């Protein structure tokens, strides 16, 4: 994740979201070092985050 965010609250929210998604899909993401995760696990977390963000945006655009 890019740590150069110009909005610290956004970085914090994305970090929290990342851990929520990892927990939801069963990836053992933890604070600090995560070098024990496979690239597939890490990619799955990122991909699922994007999927959920797109779904939320679509709901918002639909007025729900």
Image (cartoon, rainbow, N blue to C red):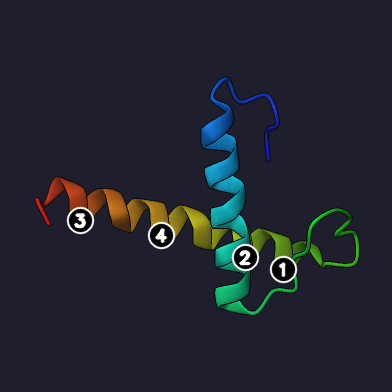
Q: Residue at x 63, y 61 (%)?
A: 19
Q: Position of residue 38 (x, y in %)?
A: 82, 67
Which tag is nearer the camera, tag 3 or tag 1?
3
- Label 1 secondary element: helix
The Cα atoms of the two marked residues, 4 and 3, are separated by 11 Å
Quarter occupied by the C terminus: bottom left
Q: Are marks 3 and 2 in contact (CB under 8 Å)?
A: no
**For residue 59, which numbered disc appears in the image?**
3
**Of the pair 34 and 46, the residue shown nearer to us:** 34
- Label 3 secondary element: helix
Compare marks 3 and 2 and give the one earlier in the sequence.
2
The Cα atoms of the two marked residues, 3 and 2, are separated by 22 Å
Q: Position of residue 26 (x, y in %)?
A: 64, 79
Compare marks 4 and 3 and give the one earlier in the sequence.
4
Residue 1 to residue 3: above or below: below
**Of the pair 44 and 2, the residue shown nearer to us:** 2
Residue 27 to residue 33: above or below: below
The Cα atoms of the two marked residues, 4 and 2, are separated by 12 Å
Compare marks 1 and 4 and give the one earlier in the sequence.
1
**Of the pair 51 and 21, the residue shown nearer to us:** 21
Q: Is residue 34 left or right of residue 59?
A: right
Q: Are marks 4 and 3 in contact (CB under 8 Å)?
A: no
Seen as rendered, the residue at the extreme top is 6
User: Which of the 4 image quadrants contains residue 47?
Assistant: bottom right
- The residue carrying pointer 2 sits among few (fewer than 14), some (14 to 19) or many (20 or more) residues within 10 Å by Cα, namely some
Residue assigned mark 4: 52
Q: Position of residue 2 (x, y in %)?
A: 68, 33
- Label 4 secondary element: helix
Residue assigned mark 1: 41
- The residue carrying pointer 3 sits among few (fewer than 14), some (14 to 19) or many (20 or more) residues within 10 Å by Cα, namely few
**Of the pair 39 and 30, the residue shown nearer to us:** 30
Residue assigned mark 2: 44
């Amino acid at each position: 994740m890019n740590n150069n965010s110009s909005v610290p609250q956004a970085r914090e929210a994305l970090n929290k979201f990342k851990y929520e998604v990892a927990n939801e899909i069963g990836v053992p993401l933890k604070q600090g070092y995560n070098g024990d995760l496979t690239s597939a696990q890490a990619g799955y977390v990122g991909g699922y985050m994007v999927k959920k963000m797109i779904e939320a945006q679509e709901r918002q655009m639909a007025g729900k």
